[in-house]
Amino acid sequence: MPQDDAAPSDHYFTAQPASAEDLRTIRVRLAGQEIEADVAAGVFSPGGVDKGTTILLGEVPAPPSSGDLLDLGCGWGPIALTLALRSPEATVWAVDVNERALDLTRRTAERLGLDNVRAVTPDDVPEDVRFAAVWSNPAIRIGKEALHEMLRRWLTRLAPGADAWLVVSKQLGADSLAGWISSDLGLPTNREATSKGFRILRATRPA
């Protein structure tokens, strides 16, 4: 997974980042349109949409038009905002442990009039919610044990027949992760695309 200027511990683990906020607004292209998004230090990729996320957004088919959609590890929100723009009738859960990231996602969603975005911490997602799709650029650098725990918690909440789409660097274990999801979580996982050193993995919960 690409790195930004913040230390990984700051944006991956910290509910309240210690770094100065340095809030600013950038222009990015999401879901085929130019938008203004709020970014800040202490959040992953504050300079814009990172390479892995760009590949994910360019390679994955259109999300379901309705139901509950999950952006796991939302950062400042490029995936969640794309899902909300493309599927206005769906409920988009933008989940992160970083309160600054959640605030940025909320601010941009409000600016865009996207009232279908729910930017929340993991424990604020109701336990009975089952996801029609999961899209994620997962935080590989948190370590294998923490990554597996995170994916076990969320991918097992896919609705029957639903897909999780993950972008993972080949150098950081995309192929071994695909094998683990298939064998340990019982979700058949395929490599759907390869681009610029990244794999797009598709994990499907059997119908």
Image: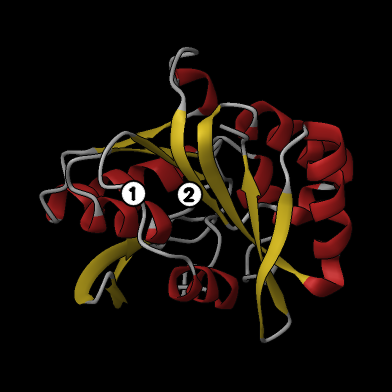
What's under tag 2, amino acid-wise? Cys
Camera sees residue 48 = no
In the rendered image, residue 164, in percent from the top left (x then y), is placed at: 57, 47
Q: Secondary structure at mark 2?
A: loop
Viewed as shown, does residue 130 lie left or right of 156? left
Residue at 50% in and 40% down:
162
Q: How many marks?
A: 2
Which mark, residue 74?
2
Quick one: label 1, few (<14), some, or many (20+) residues within 10 Å?
many
Residue drawn at 70 percent across, 71 percent down:
199
Outermost residue on the bottom side: it is 196
**From this viewpoint, is residue 69 visible?**
yes
Classify mark 1: helix, strand or loop.
Answer: helix
Q: Residue at x 78, y 43 (%)?
A: 181
Residue at 31%, 67% in the rendered image: 24
Image quarter of residue 69: top left
Verify CB contact (< 8 Å) between mark 2 and mark 1.
Answer: yes
Residue type (three-letter) at the residue carrying disc 1: Thr
Give 26 or 20, whichever is nearer the viewer: 26
In the current view of this chain or complex, which residue is farthest to the left?
Answer: 113
> Mark 2 Cα within 10 Å, few/some/many (few <14, many 20+)?
many
Residue 207's disc number:
none
Q: Position of residue 111 (x, y in %)?
A: 13, 54
Q: Is residue 138 left or right of residue 57?
A: right
Q: Does residue 96 sit above or below 121 in this rendering?
A: below
Quadrant for residue 93, please give it.
Answer: top left
State the separation of the CA atoms marked 2 and 1: 8 Å
- Furthest residue in direction front, as rendered: 207
Looking at the image, residue 171 sits to the left or right of residue 69; the answer is right
Measuring from the top left, give residue 185's x and y in whole percent.
78, 33
Quarter location, residue 68:
top left
The residue that label 1 is drawn on is: 105
